[in-house]
């Protein structure tokens, strides 16, 4: 989808996620992401999605790789179709997710990236920074991410296949 097309697509409409097919989602955060995680989970449930909360459950310090592993395990086991991780900046969560074979994580702080990462790169783990985005922007990002579908275009499928080959090295 070109950029102009994106601006008028369903992904640009924040509440469009309510119309998307219901998904099983895994959500997790570290202590820095904890304040935003509750809002994320409530919103996803309001939209009719099934949510597995992989922690953490307080602002007590926790290592984000431990939570990322739990979320990634849910996705890889098929108990969740996609995952969402929230940490302070989202960077650490994204790095941790991308260390797991079969996970394609993207750090998204805008709706264009949130939609494009799924459409072009078949991303299955969205990472956000609670220190970067607030609840309203997170809502818009989630809507774009959940509305997006991996493209049927052979160019994108070929590239994602190459990513899988890189994981084997």
Image (tube, helix red, strand yellow):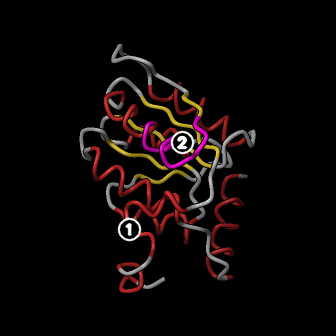
Asked if the magenta segment contains residue 115, the reply would be: no
Residue 24 is left or right of residue 84, and the answer is right
Question: How many numbered callouts?
Answer: 2
Q: Secondary structure at mark 1?
A: loop
How far apart are the two marked residues, 2 and 1, measured between alpha carbons? Answer: 27 Å
Picture quarter containing residue 58? top left
- Residue 4 position, x and y percent, is 36, 86
Q: Which mark is residue 119?
A: none
Depth order, front residue of 40/45: 45
| Magenta stretch bounds | 42-51
Q: State the residue position of label 1.
A: 13
Depth order, front residue of 144/128: 144
Residue at left 67%, top 79%? 152
Picture quarter containing residue 43? top left
Q: Earlier in the sequence, mark 2 or mark 1?
A: 1
Give the class, few, some or many, for how many residues have Cα within 10 Å of label 1's Cα (few <14, many ≥20). some
Rendered position, 135 above or below 104: above
Extreme-top residue of the structure: 60
Give the class, few, some or many, for how many residues have Cα within 10 Å of label 2's Cα (few <14, many ≥20). many
Q: Nearer the viewer, mark 2 or mark 1?
A: 1
Residue at left 52%, top 51%? 105
- Residue 127 position, x and y percent, is 43, 46
Q: Which mark is residue 97?
A: 2
Rendered position, 4 above or below 78: below
- Residue 132 position, x and y percent, is 24, 45
Q: Secondary structure at mark 2?
A: helix
Asked if the magenta segment contains residue 50, the reply would be: yes
Residue at left 64%, top 67%? 160
Depth order, front residue of 66/84: 84
Asked if the residue under mark 1 is in contact with the one under mark 2, i.e. CB atoms within 8 Å, the reply is no
Picture quarter containing residue 53? top right
- Residue 46 position, x and y percent, is 48, 44
């Amino acid at each position: 989808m070109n950029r102009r097309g994106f601006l008028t697509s369903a992904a640009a409409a924040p509440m469009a996620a309510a119309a998307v097919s219901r998904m099983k989602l895994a959500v997790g955060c570290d202590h820095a992401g904890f304040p935003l995680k509750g809002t994320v989970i409530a919103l996803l449930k309001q939209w009719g999605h099934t949510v597995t909360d992989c922690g953490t459950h307080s602002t007590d310090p926790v290592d984000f790789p431990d939570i990322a592993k739990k979320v990634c395990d849910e996705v890889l086991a098929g108990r969740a179709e996609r995952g969402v991780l929230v940490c302070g900046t989202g960077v650490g969560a994204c790095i941790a997710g991308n260390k797991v074979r079969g996970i394609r994580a993207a750090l998204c702080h805008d709706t264009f990236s949130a939609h494009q990462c799924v459409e072009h790169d078949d991303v299955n783990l969205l990472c956000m920074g609670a220190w970067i985005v607030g609840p309203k922007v997170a809502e818009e990002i989630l809507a774009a991410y959940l509305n997006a579908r991996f493209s049927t275009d052979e160019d994108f499928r070929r590239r994602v296949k190459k990513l899988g080959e890189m994981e084997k090295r």
